[in-house]
Amino acid sequence: MVISLSSSLSFINLTNSKSPISEFPSKPKTHLPKSLSSTVCCSFSSSDLGFQCKEPFFFQKGRYPHGRRFEFTSCAIPGFDYGNFESAQSVLEAAAVLTAIIVVHESGHFLAAYLQGIHVSKFAVGFGPILVKFNANNVEYSLRAFPLGGFVGFPDNDPDSDIPVDDKNLLKNRPILDRAIVVSAGVVANIIFAYLIIFTQVLSVGLPVQEAYPGVLVPEVRPFSAASRDGLLPGDVILEVNGIELPKGGPNGVSEIVDVIKQNAKRNVVLKVERGQQDFEIGIIPDENYDGTGKIGVQLSPNVRFTKVKPKSIPDAFNYTGREFWGLSSNVLDSLKQTFLNFSQTAGKVAGPVAIIAVGAEVARSNVDGLYQFAALLNLNLAIINLLPLPALDGGTLAFILIEAARGGRKLPLEVEQGIMSSGITVVIFVGLFLIVRDTLNLDFIKDML
């Protein structure tokens, strides 16, 4: 068999959180709202003396800072949809971002091996049947039918290989440090790529700066909803709810309105609204959800406005990039922590690669500039989650290498390592297939067909 380092998109965690976009240049915050911070993970496992890398995606979403506002509501809210695929260009852009991230990750593994003189036999983008391939320097490069993944192959146990099994440049025969470098190189590549993406954004389009205003903005009112029926309009700003003044900017105002609405199904809620230059009160009677909570059918977001700042010098560019990179990384780490601490609440909100592309397509439709931070977030998520010492993750393989080092170079029994990693991969595959089917059925045009 051929040892391989492979990657595939598996799953994403969507939670409904409205957080403010931090003011530049405060730290360690980022200009991307924390609610859009994502935790993406890649797994890297070994089986039959081989390695396989799976990249499950956990994603927290919310309002994006660029262009028009949009929302990906969570599964906890009736009427959830992952966006629609009306724009083929947006879908292709999102898919291209994901493919580029996979290519970068696998290139990290490939270059780490190649530069150390370790034999590499294959570099593939995608899985399944080969569409196009060519050979160079004893390496087969191929593009395959299903682009949501990729792998790097090593000829360690390939029966068709003419390389002696005791060749010192086979991956399995290299010292612990050499193998650790190859395993972790995908993570390093994604971190570097994320930094370069942010640096490019800083130089080309600049970073968004927010200014907070009183109240909570209503970007969207659903037709035939309680809000529409009782006179609330898109663009209105809610200043008070039941006589309680809302704070200036931030997510707390959104939370206060949501809490009051949920607690007052079929009871009058008085909103003080700013429309243009006028302030007045509107009484709304929330409709009742299936669980007895109230709903009025609006999208809410902090009342903030954005401009863009560009660096005046190269040192400024590195300064802005460093702040943004640190802010995004902090948000990813915090999102990951919240995911594990509240796993019972977030497990039901896990979605698959179809949803990731839908999110990316919505970002692209809103403003192509948003793809910069979308790509940076996915790279950071991939890197951070991939370091976790769990089966089917890069960190899991690194853990086995550390155990080998601690045992004085003696590896764990092959059956033990193979059993642990194989079970992890099996779980990822089944969960990934389930989520792909579920997310596909949640797409608007599929719902319309059904």
Image (spheres, rainbow, N blue to C red):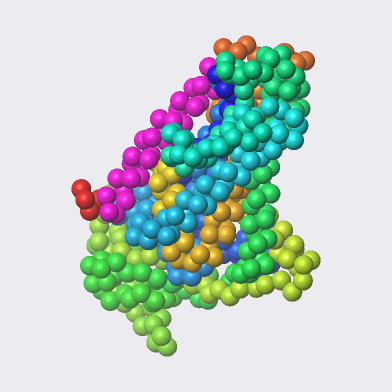
Q: What residue is rendered at 31% in x and 75% in y?
A: 232
Question: Does residue 44 lie above or below 297 as drawn?
Answer: above
Tell which of 251 and 371 is nearer to you.
371
Magenta stretch holds residue 92: no
Range of residues picked out in magenta: 418-446
Residue 285 position in % (x across, y down): 26, 67
Count of picture labels: 0
- The quadrant of the picture occupied by the N terminus is top right
Q: What residue is rendered at 27% in x and 54% in y?
A: 445
Could you tell whether 312 is left or right of 141 in the image?
right
Question: Does residue 28 lie above or below 189 as drawn?
Answer: below
Evaluate whether residue 340 shows in this view: no
Question: Does residue 172 lie above or below 223 as drawn?
Answer: above
Residue 434 position in % (x across, y down): 36, 35
Q: Quadrant of residue 265?
A: bottom left
Evaluate whether residue 351 shows in this view: yes
The dominant secondary structure in magenta is helix
Magenta stretch holds residue 438: yes
Q: What residue is rendered at 63% in x and 57% in y?
A: 197
Q: Quadrant of residue 103?
A: top right
Tell which of 354 and 247 is nearer to you.
354
As drawn, the residue found furthest toward the bottom would be: 277
Q: What residue is rendered at 47% in x and 61% in y?
A: 364
